[in-house]
Structures are given as C-alpha cells and as structure tokens.
C-alpha cells in the first residue's frame, strides 16, 4: 500500500508510492479539492491535463447533497463525477465543527443542523465510515473532533480522547466492510505536545494504513505549527503515509515536505483562482489589478499550462472585470497546474538528493506578496 522509494540525503523529504484500488500515487503529492464531487471551475479532463493523481472530496457535503443513496445508485462517486483515479474522502469533521451553534457533540457522535435546509442529523463515527465505503472512496478518513486555536488544554484533551475513541470504533466497522479501501487515522491534540504524542501512541496501537495531522492551520503561529508537525513526524511510523490536512501555500508545502510529509490538500489554488490571484514561480499576482490592464505577458513565462500558452494578463483582467466565468476557470486551471508542477519538481529534487538546492532557488525567486 505504501512503498518508500528514496530518502533525501540532507533532509527528511522522501519519495514514495501509495497504492490504491484506482491507481498509484507518487508522493509527495498535492490533492486538488473537489468538495462537492467537483474541483470548482475545472472538469476531470482539466485535472488529467494538469497531472492530478488523486483528488479529495467531502463525505459531509455529499451526504447532505445530493445524498449517498443517489450516488450509490448511479455507480459510486468515481462514476458519478467521471473521475477514475483515486479519491480520498474527508469525513467532514472540520465542516461539522465549524457549524458551532448548529451542532452538539457527544461521545456517541455529532448532532448537527444542515447548512442547506436546516434539517437536523445525527451521525456516529461508524456512520461516517459506512458513508465513505458506500461512496467507493479509495482512502477513508474517520470522524475526528477538530478544535480551534487557542483551545484550553482540558478541552483539547477531551477532544483528543474522543477522536481516538471514534477512530477505534471506525476501525471496527471499516474492517467489517473495507473491501479495497484504505483507512487513515487522524492525530489531534491541538498545540499541546503531550496530547499529540498520546494520540499518536493510541492510533498506532489501533493500526491504520496511514496517518494524518489534523487541527493545524486554524490560527496558530507558524513557528508553533511546524514544531508540532516535526514532533509528530518524529513519532509516526515511517512505513506509512503521512498526510497534512488542509495546509497548502507553496511555501508551507515546501517546509512540510522537508519535514517528511507525503500528502497535501488545500482549497487555495481554486479559491484564489476564482478571485483573480495566480501563483507563479515569482510569487502571487492579482491579475484584476489595474497594472495589468495592457500587459501582454502570460501569467507566468515559466509555465506551459493552457492559460499561459494562450492568454495575456490583459485578457484575463478583462474577463474578471466583465464578470465572465472564463476568467475564474483559466486562472484556477493555471493554479492547479502550477501546484502539481511544483510537486513534480519537488519529487525530482528529492530523487536527485538536491532538495535544499531546489528550496533555496525557489525561495530566491518566489516573493510572498
């Protein structure tokens, strides 16, 4: 399921291959986010063109709309969205806990009010696993309790123990119905090192196909975030996939790869793209700005994506000012292409034992505006 291919000589960055029912994934890898069975503005053909190996979808959103029964009746999530490569489904725990006043958490599960129609639902961790198996997910994520920063240690401890209990219950129902899917455990514990280590130990005792770091990028200082990531990676099994959930600017990805993370997801490429901001090898640019009104250059002279090969910054700015949907689509396409090309070059640098050289060169050119 996970084969370590090469450990970079100067860092903890590593090359590996993750095998799933719908294909293999070369890591380090970035997963475009298709929350509602679609990566916003992009078609499956676009994702293939960009080089996507795996995408992420969200069980919570699909449970609410269009409903698991419909997707199952139409042949499962892969067929429903016409994507035949691997899919990781998130449990939706973060989205549920973001509802704040609209949900009630107990050791048994979560009661919440739909943000769509106001209808109330109750889901146990067992239900969340069954939903993802019915969707046909390649990688299943259990329900966990994510807390925001700052969080009092006593509540962070309650949430961590609840996450472990839910993981144990999820593993039981998963083993009964697993078919060909993989199940990852999620490490919680907020910014408290002892809680993170206790959670890791408990999850390893249960046993999972991979391990994810949750509850980060929720407002904590970056220095604290990377201390927690480094701490966790020093104690997680090296023979399993390590997945950093929801964190994903280019600079953050490079730092996390150096520490030994294998898998990433984030909405940043398409969210920024829909708002007219493009990621380039020189940094971010907001093409809606007046300075690009007559700029005949592509978004990025170093990029060979469809957008950069065919359209000027001036044209893209015109599309956004005219409120044409094509603008969002073209910049999102470029951003996803950029992210996946960044990962390809990272993998090449690791293979050649020159990751630190690659990082230095990238940082010398990339300006974080």
Image (cartoon, rainbow, N blue to C red):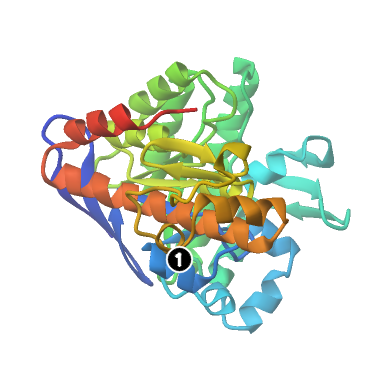
How packed mark 1 is, by other alpha carbons closer than 10 Å (few <14, some 14-19, many 20 or more), is many
Q: Residue furthest bottom?
A: 74
Residue 82 seen in the figure: yes
Please state the horizontal and vertical placement of residue 55, each as a whole percent of the image: 47, 60
Most foreground residue, 171 or 258: 258
**Which quadrant of the view contains residue 121?**
bottom right
Please state the horizontal and vertical placement of residue 35, each as a whole percent of the image: 61, 57
Say above or below: 74 vs 6. below
Tell me the element at label 1. helix
40 vs 183, left or right, is right
Most foreground residue, 200 or 96: 96
The residue at the point 40 percent across, 49 percent down is: 339
The residue at the point 61 percent across, 50 percent down is: 317
204 vs 170, left or right, is left
Most foreground residue, 368 or 232: 368
Q: Residue furthest right?
A: 118
The residue at the point 34 percent across, 58 percent down is: 304
For mark 1, what is the residue?
A: 47
Residue 58 seen in the figure: no
Say above or below: 359 vs 39. above
Please state the horizontal and vertical placement of residue 229, each as a whole percent of the image: 39, 28
């Amino acid at each position: 399921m996970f084969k370590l291919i090469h450990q970079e000589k100067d860092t903890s960055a590593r090359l590996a291959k993750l095998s799933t029912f719908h294909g293999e994934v070369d890591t380090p890898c970035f997963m475009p986010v298709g929350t509602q069975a679609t990566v916003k503005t992009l078609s499956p053909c676009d994702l293939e063109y960009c080089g996507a190996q795996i995408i992420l979808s969200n069980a919570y959103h699909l449970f609410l709309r269009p409903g698991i029964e419909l997707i199952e009746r139409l042949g499962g999530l892969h067929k429903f969205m016409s994507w035949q490569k691997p899919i990781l489904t998130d449990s939706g725990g973060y989205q549920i806990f973001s509802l704040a006043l609209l949900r009630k958490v107990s050791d048994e599960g979560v009661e919440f009010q739909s943000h769509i129609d106001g209808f109330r639902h109750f889901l146990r961790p067992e239900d969340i696993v069954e939903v993802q198996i019915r969707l046909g997910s390649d990688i299943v994520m259990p329900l966990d309790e994510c807390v925001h920063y700052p969080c009092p240690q006593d509540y962070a401890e309650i949430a961590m123990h609840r996450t472990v209990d839910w993981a144990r219950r999820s593993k039981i129902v998963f083993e009964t119905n697993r078919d060909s899917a993989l199940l990852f455990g999620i490490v919680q514990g907020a910014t408290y090192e002892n809680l993170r280590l206790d959670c890791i130990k408990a999850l390893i005792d249960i046993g999972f196909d991979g391990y994810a770091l949750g509850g980060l990028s929720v407002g904590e200082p970056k220095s604290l975030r990377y201390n927690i990531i480094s701490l966790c990676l020093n104690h997680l099994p090296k023979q399993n996939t390590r997945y950093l959930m929801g964190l994903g600017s280019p600079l953050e990805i490079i730092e996390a790869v150096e520490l030994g993370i294998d898998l990433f997801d984030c909405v940043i490429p398409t969210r920024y793209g829909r708002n007219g901001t493009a990621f380039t090898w020189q940094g971010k640019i907001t093409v809606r700005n007046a300075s690009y009104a007559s700029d005949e250059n592509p978004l990025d002279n170093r990029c060979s994506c469809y957008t950069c090969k065919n359209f000027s910054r001036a044209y893209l700015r015109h599309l956004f000012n005219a409120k044409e949907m094509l603008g969002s689509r073209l910049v999102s396409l470029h951003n996803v292409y950029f992210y996946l090309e960044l990962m390809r070059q990272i993998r090449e640098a690791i293979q050649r034992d020159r990751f630190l050289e690659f990082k230095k060169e990238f940082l010398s050119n990339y300006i974080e505006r």
